[in-house]
Image (tube, rainbow, N blue to C red):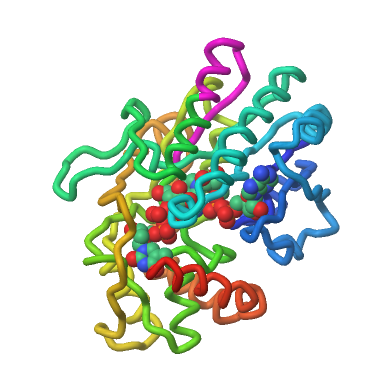
């Protein structure tokens, strides 16, 4: 099978490519990535000779048309992915996440191919801390930030193309990923790399916000399971029952990195900050044989911390620029 991976130089996409080379060696992989600040070719170095890499944007209709025509399946990770950036400058989110997805859908329709669209639990808005319900595939979309609104828009386009044109597509909405090769702007790598540099973790507001953490390999295994065992036209929620609030996560990171429990500081909160995400992944588990391998958040974090400690060259170049942005935003 020939597989086009969009956003394959980013965090989840690059881990997907590495994983797919391991568990599906017969797949012929082409990556298209615009190499924004979030793309990193070093993430693909171990498989550089085994894949085809095309630098370009999914908003480029001609390029997308050509690449889709040459492949059987598109796995669509490419997006602007950071909420804080979307609050600062929403336009790249509209272009990559909405227009880029539209270009892919049109090419997939024209050439009668298949697409799996990667999305986020953030499209469903947020939950109260004591809400006994979790997100389901039937939960109405209710996004809060320009990022999540752009992802919800893309999801709605995919669903419309399925219904109106019979597009061969599946969707998945996953919770917060962690693991190696995540950009240092994101919560967990920001704190780990800060501590490695002697800087205290930064907690937005009071830190009561809850995220439903999943290891990136578990996310990517679920994507493979959906592509192979899921039903066309369906949406699957991906989650590993990993709810933790941000204070708890910082406490765990500090403990694993041998720092005192109070060695962190509060910074300004994110405007419109979603309170809680929580995924009910019953449908995925009922229809596929997928089960998360990383059941223990401590073991997953230990592996992630070790990776950042051993791969300074991977993140050091982007650390200063990232912190300059945060300094301007007061976070
Ligand atoms: P990331 O920011 O690390 O990587 C995104 C990649 O897409 C980068 O390599 C970037 O260069 C590329 N890209 C951006 N715009 C592009 C364009 N116009 N054309 C081609 N490439 C482009 O993001 P990530 O965390 O790996 O997220 C990947 C996908 O997973 C996104 O669709 C995101 O919404 C979704 N998702 C992320 C999480 C998470 O916790 N990180 C959870 C659920 C879903
Ligand atoms: O839920 C899935 C989403 O998870 C994905 O769609 C997004 O692409 C991904 O970035 C992530 O979004 P969040 O906004 O939840 O992730 P982030 O890493 O930015 O922040 C996680 C939590 O930590 C959030 O409550 C904000 C908080 N935070 C973040 C940073 C960077 C801090 O307290 N301090 C920080 O320094």
Q: Is residue 168 magenta?
A: yes
- Residue 81 vs residue 77, the one in the foreground: 81
Q: Is residue 116 magenta?
A: no
Q: On the picture, is 246 further left or further right than 7?
A: left
Question: Which residue is rendered at x = 32% and y = 40% of the image?
Answer: 125
Q: On the picture, is 206 further left or further right than 224?
A: left
Which residue is the extreme one toward the left? Answer: 130
Residue 2 visible to an observer of this rendering: yes
- Residue 191 vs residue 231, the one in the foreground: 191
Residue 331 against residue 83 in the figure, above or below: below
Question: Could you tell me residue 135's position as x and y percent?
Answer: 31, 37
Question: Which residue is rendered at x = 22% and y = 66% of the image?
Answer: 206
Question: Could you tell me residue 274's position as x and y percent?
Answer: 30, 49
- Of the four image quadrants, the one with ligand 2 is bottom left
Question: Could you tell me residue 97's position as x and y percent?
Answer: 57, 39
Question: Which residue is rendered at x = 47% and y = 55% of the image?
Answer: 88
Image quarter hosting the N terminus: top right
Total marks drawn?
Answer: 0
The quadrant in which residue 3 appears is: top right
Residue 12 visible to an observer of this rendering: no
Question: Could you tell me residue 113's position as x and y percent?
Answer: 72, 23
- Residue 95 vs residue 19, the one in the foreground: 95
Residue 54 against residue 170 in the figure, above or below: below
Question: Which residue is rendered at x = 44% and y = 73% of the image?
Answer: 327
Residue 138 against residue 93 in the figure, above or below: above
The quadrant in which residue 35 appears is: bottom right
Residue stretch rendered in magenta on the structure: 157-173
Image quarter hosting the C terminus: bottom left
Q: On the picture, is 55 further left or further right than 205?
A: right
């Amino acid at each position: 099978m020939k597989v086009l991976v969009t956003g394959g130089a980013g965090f989840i996409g690059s881990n997907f490519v590495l994983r797919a080379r391991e568990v599906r060696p017969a797949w012929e992989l082409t990556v298209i990535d615009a190499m924004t600040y979030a793309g990193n070719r070093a993430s693909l170095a171990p498989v550089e000779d085994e894949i085809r890499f095309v630098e370009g944007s999914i908003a480029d209709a001609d390029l997308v048309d050509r690449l889709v025509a040459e492949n059987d399946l598109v796995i669509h990770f490419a997006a602007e992915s950071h909420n804080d950036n979307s609050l600062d400058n929403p336009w790249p989110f509209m272009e990559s996440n909405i227009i880029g997805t539209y270009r892919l859908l049109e090419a997939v329709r024209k050439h009668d191919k298949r697409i799996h669209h990667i999305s986020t639990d953030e499209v469903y808005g947020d939950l109260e801390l004591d809400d006994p319900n979790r997100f389901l595939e039937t939960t109405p979309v209710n996004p809060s930030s320009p990022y999540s609104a752009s992802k919800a828009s893309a999801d709605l386009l995919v669903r419309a193309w399925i219904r109106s044109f019979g597009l061969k597509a599946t969707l998945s909405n996953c919770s917060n990923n962690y693991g190696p090769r995540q950009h240092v702007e994101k919560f967990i790598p920001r704190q780990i790399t800060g501590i490695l540099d002697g800087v205290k973790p930064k907690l937005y507001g009071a830190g009561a916000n809850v995220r439903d953490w999943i290891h990136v390999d578990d996310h990517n295994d679920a994507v493979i399971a959906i592509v192979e065992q899921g039903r066309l036209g369906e949406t699957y929620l991906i989650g590993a029952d990993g709810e933790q609030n941000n204070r708890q996560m910082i406490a765990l990171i500090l403990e694993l990195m041998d720092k005192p429990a109070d060695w962190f500081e509060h910074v300004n909160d994110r405007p419109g900050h979603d309170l809680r995400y929580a995924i009910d992944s019953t449908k995925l588990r009922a229809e596929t044989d997928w089960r998360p391998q990383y059941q223990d958040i401590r073991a997953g974090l230990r592996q992630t911390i070790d990776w950042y400690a051993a791969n300074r060259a991977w993140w050091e170049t982007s650390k200063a620029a990232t912190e300059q942005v945060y300094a301007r935003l007061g976070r």
